[in-house]
Structures are given as structure tokens and as C-alpha cells.
Image (cartoon, rainbow, N blue to C red):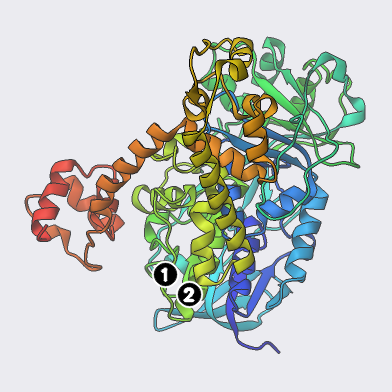
Amino acid sequence: MFPEYDIIVVGAGHAGCEAAAAAANLGSKVMLVTMNMQTIAQMSCNPAMGGVAKGQIVREIDALGGYSGIVTDKTMIQFRMLNRSKGPAMWSPRAQSDRLLFAKEWRDMLEQTPNIDFWQDMVSGLLIKDGVVIGIRTGMGMEIRSKAVVLTNGTFLNGIIHIGEKQFGGGRMAEKSSTGITEQLISLGLESGRMKTGTPPRIDGRSLNYSLMEEQKGDENPGKFSYTNTTSLTKQKSCYITYTNQEVHDVLKTGFEQSPMFAGRIQGLGPRYCPSIEDKINRFADKTRHQLFIEPEGWDTIEIYVNGFSTSLPEEVQYKALKLIPGLENVRMFRPGYAIEYDFFPPHQLHTTLETRSVKNLFHAGQINGTTGYEEAACQGIMAGINAHQKINEQHEFVLTRDEAYIGVLIDDLITKGTNEPYRMFTSRAEYRILLRQDNADIRLTPLANKIGLVNDERLELVNKKIEEAKQIMDFFRKEGVTPDEINSILTEQDSSEIKQKTKLLQLLSRPQIEMKDLREKVASVKKMLAGKMEDSIEQAEILMKYEGYIEKEKEIVEKMNRLEYVPVPENFDFSVINSLSLEAREKLKKFKPRTLGQASRISGVNPSDISVLMVYLGR
């Protein structure tokens, strides 16, 4: 019935969709298997993409030729650039999305991608021969052959949903869980664990009093995620902010005895950075209120997402507490919040390509690796899809380093540190975040994607144009000066000291109070120079000029640290024979199997003295 596929992708969430698209666009024949064709790319949790560090990841996915940025641009209902008051390393794009349009656009793009076939069924097991995966077995008993398999099972592996004292099997509300794969992988020598995540109740927007809340509008000049020619928003929907209070907390506490988390019915590891409301009340007992974001789920729906109120308390307790929140006094609830517990496989069992060490040509991406978040899942998906294609075609593996991308940071963290809680990306996790900005993801990554054939020459030409235009602008600012008559009125307006003689434009732009827009609007020579230049080029030039010293210093640090990155550790190296290593280092190195000294240096429990010993032992 089925031909043999190059790659089978199991699961059509954010990781699975990006994996299928990447592999297919590279030329592989792909089968995307999902338990429900109607929930492809569904936003199971909040209807938003991006945010702090996550927005950088979406832009990186786009720079690599992925679809997440394009889909977000086409379906967003609000755009905000977070952290604008801080330096550009912290700027993070975030979009509120139309949940239904988002899933529809993803499905449309996948259906229009040559080389992708679809099949609706549960995958109950893998076909494995001599330690190599050769296909899948479905719940209906069908066997589909392939050269590689990418598992992106999300929260479906033996998923259990909890609401108060009720619990039932499911990967999402009203969707059954997936069984069989965990048990088979354990039998093949993989170690598994349990994690949990949660979601808040959904409510009726018609029942809310928005006048009692703080309005949160989108940016006046909304940006976008994709470097392609997607259009910017011309109208936006507002979100709103409200707060819990002591009365709300007291009501929620009445349900703690029935809470699956406090009663011990949930054994899985929960997200520290996105805790349930009951967890917040318990952990931060001194706080009398917690912030909630009232987020619309789309242009044409009345459904509202209560961000910050994730809970698995009994539904009657949830409802009673909601009615005590300002603006929600007459709230109507569509469905209660719930927690979901599911299987994952600790990611130290993977190569940096996301291929499992135990089974060849089997790749893991997304929540199966212990991460949380659409963006974290999607970036693993594109990397797994690329590397599955590269592996079966005997091409060089595609791995991003920590100084090249947040994606590189995420995967390196997973491989070298593992995770004992759902992993979420933050800017603080990246030691080179001045280099890994959202504005330059195309410059960093599009040439790499073009080299392997995932991005066409037209996009590369656009990147080269951006680089060249930015260089022209910087050269102009270094050479050209302005007189006091031309600039002093602007300097005074911006509370910056006046000049007494002709001064180079670069020197003036380096002042914290002066921005490119100030010079562009009122200095004739600058206005003329920038005419016809791409906005991306202008922004790039301004950032590079303002933060030149910091950027150069960070590049120097990268060069020093990369000396360790290129010292390889043999694949089956026996660390136990090196008695000079600490006992903990030997155990950790044996468990994580680093490929380079750089990776070894980032493993918790491996000290600088252990690295020195390894350097000597490896002849360095």
C-alpha cells in the first residue's frame, strides 16, 4: 500500500511540521503521521509565538528556511517587540496569533510542499533491524518503511490529564494518548522519565469587563518575524492585564487537598518558569497578587486565554476563583484548566544532530527531549529534519554552535547538561547574546542554509544586500561630519551636550541619547544617504555602530573559547581509565559522551582541572 519513504515524521505539532518541511524541501520523500489531521500545528497552550529569547529562535528558524516565522506573520493579531528599553541583545519579538488561522496556514503550507504525504493513525512502534530504524508500525497494524524516523510526540506518550481528583488518558483535552513507543524504546536501552505541563481555563470574552483591566496594545509600527516579503499588520487586537488577589488565593487554597500536584498523583517534573497558579501561591506565599494576561484567541472568536492561571484544581474551584478577579466577576468558562503528564527521554542520549545514540537513523525533537514551548520544539524539528536528510544521503551533519545561534545553545544545553525540568530558553542561557540578536539571524544562518540547499540564492542575495548596505552606511558615518549649526538643536532636544566644532556622525550616534531616527529626520546629508536603503540595513548599521566595542569584545571571547570546541574527543573514549579525573567527572563524561573538549567543559560536575587533564591525555 505504501512506498518506502526517505523519512517518516511522527507527530504534527510544531517540531513535526518543521521537521517534515525541512526534510521535504531538501529533497527527501516524507511521510507525516499524525493521530488527527484536524490538529496539525495546533497551539495547545497560549496562542502566541516568540517572546524573550523565543522570538530570536523564530527568526533563526526563518533564516534557515523554516515556516514558523512566515505562518506567524500571516496569522498574528498583535505584534510587540519586548525589551525595547534595553540593549538590542535583549530585543525579542512576540506575536499574539489567531489560533485557528495559525493551524490552517501551517497545514496549507505543508500541503503545498512537494514531497510530503500525510497519514492519520497512531504510531504504536518502530521497525528496527540490526540497531537501525527502518520504519513504523501503526495502531491499525500497518507497516510503513523508511530510511529514517523523526519522533516528535509532544505530550502524547502515555499522556495522563489531571483535573482535581479526576484523571484520564490523553495527549490533549479530547484527544487520546499514544502508547507503545515508550516501552519499545526502553527495551532498546533508552532511559525515560515523566514530565508535566499545564494549561489555564478558556473563558468567554463577552462576559468580561475590560474597563477594570489594563489595556496592552501592540506596537505602533508593528514588525514581523520573517525575513521574506510577508506583510506587516495594519490593525491589531489588544490584550489586557489583570491581577489575582488574596481572596482569589484563599479560594484556590480550598482545593489544594484535591490538587493532583500536592496530593502526589502527579509524579512528573513541572516547569519552574511557567508554574501553575497553585504552585505560585505555594512557592511565593508572601505575594498578595499575581499578574494575569487576558489574551484573545483570534480575530473572529470570543474565546479568551487566561495566561498566568495554569491550573489542575477541581473545575468548581477554578470557576469560583476566576469570578473574584477584577474584570472577571461575571465570567463564563468554556473549559477548565488541566495538567498533563507524559513520557520524555532525557536528551543526553542524543548526538548533537538529535539522532539517538542507541538506534541509528532515529531522531527525537521537541517535548520528547524534555523541552517546553512551541519555539523550542520547532527549532529542534527543523534541525532533526535537516540532519535526518543529511544522514540518509551521507552528507555532512548540520550542527550549530553556541556562538552561531540560540538553537545551538539549546541543543548543546540538552546534550551536555540534560534537563530535570521542562527546558525553556532564556537570553541568560546564551553567553554570546550580543552576537545572537534577533536582527542578524539572517546574516548568521541564511548562508549556512543556502550551502545545504534549504534556502535559495534569492534569499542569500537579500542577505548580502543587507550586509553591503549596512557597510555603506557605517563607512559614511565614519567619514562624514556635521557642524554645530546642523546638529545642536537635535542634541539639545535629546538632552545631549552640544558640540563646538565639526564632529563625525559616528561619534554622535554613539551617544546613548541619540538614535538614527533623530539624525535621519533632521540632518540632510544623513537623510540623503539613507534614501532607498532597506530598513533592515539601517537598523543593522545602527546596532553595529552603537555597540561596536561590546560586539568586538564578545568576538574575542568566542575565539578563545572555540579553541576547546575544535579539540575532538574520540567517539568511544574510555574515561574510566584516567585516574587523574575526579570520580564525578568520570561518571558524568561517561554518561554524556562529549564530542569535543568544549562540550566536556560545560557538563555540570566537570571542573577546569578535569579539562586540563583531558587536554594532556589527548595530546593538547
User: Which residue is nearer to you in this view: 538 or 26?
Assistant: 538
Residue occupying the point 63% across, 39% down: 529
Quadrant assignment, res 84: top right
Q: Which mark is residue 390?
A: 2
Q: Which mark is residue 397?
A: 1
Q: Marks 1/2: CA distance? A: 6 Å
User: Which residue is nearer to you in this view: 606 or 155?
Assistant: 606
How many neighbours does mark 1 have within 10 angstroms: few (below 14), some (14-19), or many (20 or more)? some
Q: Amino acid at mark 1?
A: Glu
Residue occupying the point 67% across, 70% down: 33
Q: Secondary structure at mark 2?
A: helix
Asked if labels 2 and 1 touch by Cβ distance under 8 angstroms, the answer is: yes
Image position of 135 (left or right of 240):
left
Is 147 drawn above or below residue 241 in the view shown?
Answer: below
Q: Amino acid at mark 2?
A: Gln
Query: Which part of the image, by quadrant, shows the N terminus?
Result: bottom right
The answer, for residue 573, to whether it is visible in the render is yes
How many neighbours does mark 2 have within 10 angstroms: few (below 14), some (14-19), or many (20 or more)? some
Residue occupying the point 56% across, 59% down: 64
Where residue 285 appears, as percent x and y from the top left, is: 54, 14
Quadrant assignment, res 490: top right
